[in-house]
Amino acid sequence: MARVLGCDKVGIRASGLVESKDSRVCQRSCSSSCRVLSLDCGFGGAPVAHAMSRSNDSQNALHSTSKGLLDSTTKSQWCPDPESQESGHLPKIISWHKPSIGEFKLNVDGSSINNFQNAGGGGLLRDHTGTLVFAFSENLEAKNSLQAELLALHSGLLLCQENNISRLWTEMEAMIVIQMLKEGHIGSHDSRYLWASIRQQLKLFSFKISHIHRKGNQATNWLANHGHQHHGLQVLKEAQGKLRGILTLDKSNLPYVRLK
């Protein structure tokens, strides 16, 4: 039996824009009315919801159709983010999208807690069917948030090299990293070598880099937070538990609904 789920101003995982006759209008007060119907998904008791809304689905992206070229003289393209130009309080649909056939998708995330004394990084690579190739979680010790994001990207690219990936689509939440790569920044003295190494690694791929909202990057967010709890680098070939549930929902093309 379906049950009504209050939106409570938080992100909800949605199974599409299909209206159900059993749906009900959310009774909790929120800045925009929403219609949701929760269903069992088998993922830690969390509901999957039908949500009625519309949203443009586009992303910030840095593309390179020639291997390793990042400057403005190459075949690169910078796409503005339409979401940043939207007004109002309509719900937004945020999805993880599969790469094209022959392409692989790397999602990465970094996190720093306890006044930068405990940093973690995580990421995972999936193919055009959404099937996991590898996942990793890493304890980065004492690093700030930007350093954690860079180190997570660095580790992810190294693992892609080890797996002989040639066509790569990378997604991350850290817009500042994408912007600095686009503009050719060399970074501060304590991260200059890391920036240079990332650029050298990117030369090995036909690649594009784009931004994804945190709601659509939950698998890597979980992996980065897990990195706070262990030592060194852990690489997985198979997902278990909560991570497996997140990847199953991503693979099924179930979007998140972000309610403001």
Image (cartoon, grey):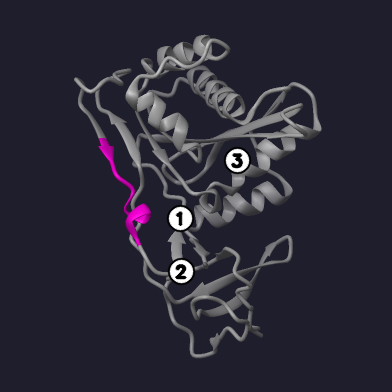
Residue at point 36%, 47% (across, down): 59
Residue at point 52%, 67% (across, down): 260
On residue 91, the disc is 2
Badge 2 amino acid: Pro
Foreground residue among 143 and 240: 143
In the shown orientation, is residue 22 left or right of residue 239?
Answer: left
Query: Would you place residue 256 above or below residue 214 in this image?
Result: below
Q: Earlier in the sequence, mark 3 or mark 1?
A: 1
Q: Position of residue 179 (x, y in %)?
A: 39, 31
Residue at point 50%, 79% (across, down): 34
In the shown orientation, is residue 85 left or right of residue 139?
Answer: left
Q: Secondary structure at mark 1?
A: loop
Query: Would you place residue 255 above or below residue 53 in this image?
Result: above
Query: Would you place residue 236 above or below residue 49 in this image?
Result: above
Magenta extent: 78-86
Residue behind mark 1: 95
Q: Secondary structure at mark 2?
A: loop
Residue behind mark 3: 220
